[in-house]
Image (cartoon, helix red, strand yellow):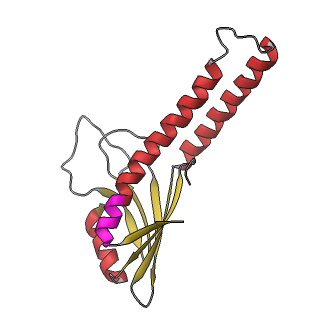
Amino acid sequence: MLFLPFEKLTYTTLLSENEICNRINCLTKASRAFRSKYYPEIKISEYEGEVIGATFDLRRAIWYRNSFLPLMSGTIETTVPGTILKVKMQMHLAVMIFMCIWFAGTLFGTVAVFSFQRFAMGTYFPLPFVLLLAGYGMMMLGFKLESRKAKNDLQKLFEAEMTEV
């Protein structure tokens, strides 16, 4: 989706399901609960997550902080000419809830500014709009930059053609 931090992708490849699972397993390591930029570990893999049967859950292993990092979940389906991977990218649930509260608060502030100042152009007039745009901009920029990297990585890894649903 263009204006929301969600993406649904379909990869079509000639690789087998087992080959795809092996490639994902080679690329990933188990998820860690805590990271530290002061004590970085040797970069062994680029992704964290797991593969269970024909499904997988991944996220990029980054050394910096990004609350809007896309979480990728996908399924692997075998077809006659090859394999189809259906991947869904979205933000963490806690981040989505926080952003909904942020947007609700800024919309409430916008309504309050309009109703109490009766469209007067005071000093606080642009503040709710700035907060709304800043929150949306941070969310989309943080999500889309990381999702673009992940899409390119997965396309190269699976030697696949990608289509957005």
| In front of the other: 95 or 78 | 78
Where residue 30 appears, as percent x and y from the top left, is: 33, 60
Q: Main secondary structure of the magenta part?
A: helix
| In front of the other: 77 or 14 | 14
Q: Residue at x 64, y 23 (%)?
A: 128
Q: Residue at x 35, y 72 (%)?
A: 160
Q: Residue furthest bottom?
A: 80
Q: Residue furthest left?
A: 42
- Where's the C terminus, which quadrant? bottom right
Q: Is residue 163 visible?
A: yes
Q: Is residue 30 visible?
A: no
Q: Residue at x 59, y 38 (%)?
A: 98
Where residue 22 appears, as percent x and y from the top left, is: 29, 75
Quarter location, residue 47? bottom left
Q: Is residue 102 magenta?
A: no
Range of magenta residues: 152-159
- Where's the N terminus, which quadrant? bottom right
Above/below status of 35 relative to 27: above
**Residue 115 as seen in the image, left or right of residue 65:** right
